[in-house]
Amino acid sequence: MSALDQMYQQVILDHAKFPHGRGLPEGDEGATAVAVAPHPGCGISHQVNPTCGDEITLRVDVSRAGGVAVVDDVRWEGQGCSISQASASVLHDLVIGQDLATVDRLSATFHELMSSRGAGLDDEAAEDLLGDAVAFTGSSKFPARIKCALLGWAALSDALILSGAREE
Amino acid sequence: MSVTTDGLTSAELAAVRADFPLLARTLRDGRPLVYLDSGATAQKPEVVIDAEQDFYVQRNAAVHRGAHQLAEEATEAFEDARGKVARFVGVDADELVWAKNATEGINLVAYAMGNASAGRGGAAARRFALGPGDEIVVTEAEHHANLVPWQELAFRTGATLRWLGLDDEGRIRLDELDTVVTERTRVLAFTHASNVTGAVTPVEPLVARAHEVGALVVLDACQSVPHLPVDLHALGVDFAAFSGHKMYGPTGVGALYGRRELLEALPPFLTGGSMVEIVTMTETTFLPPPQRFEAGTQMVAQAVALGVAADYLAELGMANVAAHEHHVAGRLLEAVASVPGVRLIGPHDARDRLATVSFVVDGVHAHDVGAVLDDKGVAVRVGHHCAQPVHRRFGIAATSRASAGVYTTDDEVEAFREALSGVRAFFGLEGDR
């Protein structure tokens, strides 16, 4: 497989074409990181990739059940390349229903994958955890595209802080 | 000799390409390089690479000081280079200030004007002082380097920033000139050629209007100096900045031209060593220009090599270079027009435009376009090209840009067209192939 086909695996092209979680509830679009979220447990973050102007606004809703904070929903809106759009779509599928400890583990593992310069993780359990996100291994070979893949994750990390879910 | 392209014969073009060692390298999978990113930075001819090395091998010493032979030779090489670059753009050597790049050159003017606004430079510098009620005019076509320094100067002085808009082909709206540039305008800063649309600005009416209202003209000549014959005295601009690395010279060096009487009256920007006369514990007097604006150790080897780059272009003849690139511009425009689902951002005909061609591919983000072209060995730039307002004007966030140089061939344009025609199919979009 060429380096290009490794980057644009079918699963990425599919997510880019039919993204999951895309579309913010009315009123959130264009919200900035400092915007007041509609209710406690909700965080909204706007992130920009300054090298290409790609943007994402991501909203996370977190609830607390039995002392554990869980991601109830992720919605996002953005414009960008297929890598950034597909990554946000995969993120949506991965984190909904997960507690924050799992979300943090997913984020750390995905960052590790994107630092692997195309080598992958050499850790079956970690790759199982990432599911579809393993398809981004090919993008990690292209330094200019790593930020694209991480844009949604940066927005999630910021949105979780703004949601207040980490303070409780 | 057979003439296959306007301006350069095929033999001349082959000889030019042989001057640039990097053009011969191959990429992944042994693919030949098709370098269409000269608008970002140009490749370097061997004479330039050698000149920089030769300076270190033969002549390296501190310039403008030291009583030894090496220092004299280094100073001579440094000042000779100033003369060559100055002559290349039609100005006198003492009107040319070295800067690390065009960005620094423009900031030099903006910060020096800020210093004048704060009262520095005495009575002579009062002509540069800005305050509330004064206006700085730019255009929507500007690279961030000729926009942000003026925004900041306006914030520091209380002056107001205004701008000329662009028409649907990306040309500056001259019909707005008389209403936007008024008696309140103190500075008119604009690009000689857009690094996104490739449109070349008609300098004359802008200079005429600016001088009619007593405003200073600052020209961003980054994209024009490497590609067109440029005579800054004939253009009548007051200041102009350009970079070395886009004109086949090294990185780390650029130049600012200032009309002599203006440089003489302008207070310094960066201060410190090499730009002073008498220094006491409380105050300092400054050297005349250009040294007044060259604080600290300069990029001597790079300046020397830039002088060689200017000579290289002068020997080719800028009229020939421009004619060749005009031909390439026509080919690039044809290539972009021939591929379904590709939309040009900029003038549609090759008149008064550079061989810098930006476009969007329907349904495919610029980053993805660049990746597919790269896979075929075709190097283009993707993104906003440090000109976000231009993109916002056209309702887009990013474009892909093919930009040629003196060494670009018809075969390369054909390789670009071929690669571009496969982009939409790669992403499963219909309408081509």
Image (cartoon, coloured by chain):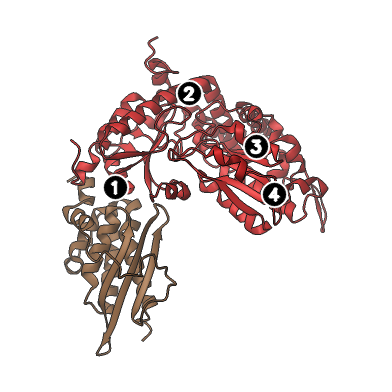
Chain colours: A brown, B red
Q: In terms of sequence position, does the residue under pointer 2 or pointer 4 come before the other?
A: 4
Q: Label 3: chain?
A: B
* Disc 2 packing (10 Å; few <14; some 14–19; many ≥20): many
Viewed as shown, does residue A90 lie left or right of A165? left
Viewed as shown, does residue A81 lie left or right of B97? left
Q: CA distance from mark 2 to mark 4?
A: 35 Å
* Disc 4 packing (10 Å; few <14; some 14–19; many ≥20): many
Whole-percent x and y of residue B297?
65, 45
Near-viewer residue (B368 or B335) = B335
Whether B186 is drawn above or below A73: the answer is: above
**Residue that numbered label 2 is attached to:** B321
Q: What residue type is disc 2 on? A: Val
Q: What residue type is disc 4 on? A: Ala
Residue B51 appears in the rendering: yes
Q: Label 4: chain?
A: B
* Disc 3 packing (10 Å; few <14; some 14–19; many ≥20): some
Labelled pair 1, 3 in contact (Cβ < 8 Å) = no
Q: CA distance from mark 2 to mark 3?
A: 30 Å
Near-viewer residue (A130 or B22) = A130
| For discs 2 and 3, the disc positioned in front in the rendered view | 3
Q: Label 2: chain?
A: B
Residue B65 appears in the rendering: no
Q: In terms of sequence position, does the residue under pointer 4 or pointer 1 come before the other?
A: 4
Whole-percent x and y of residue B323?
46, 21
**Residue that numbered label 3 is attached to:** B209
| For discs 1 and 3, the disc positioned in front in the rendered view | 3
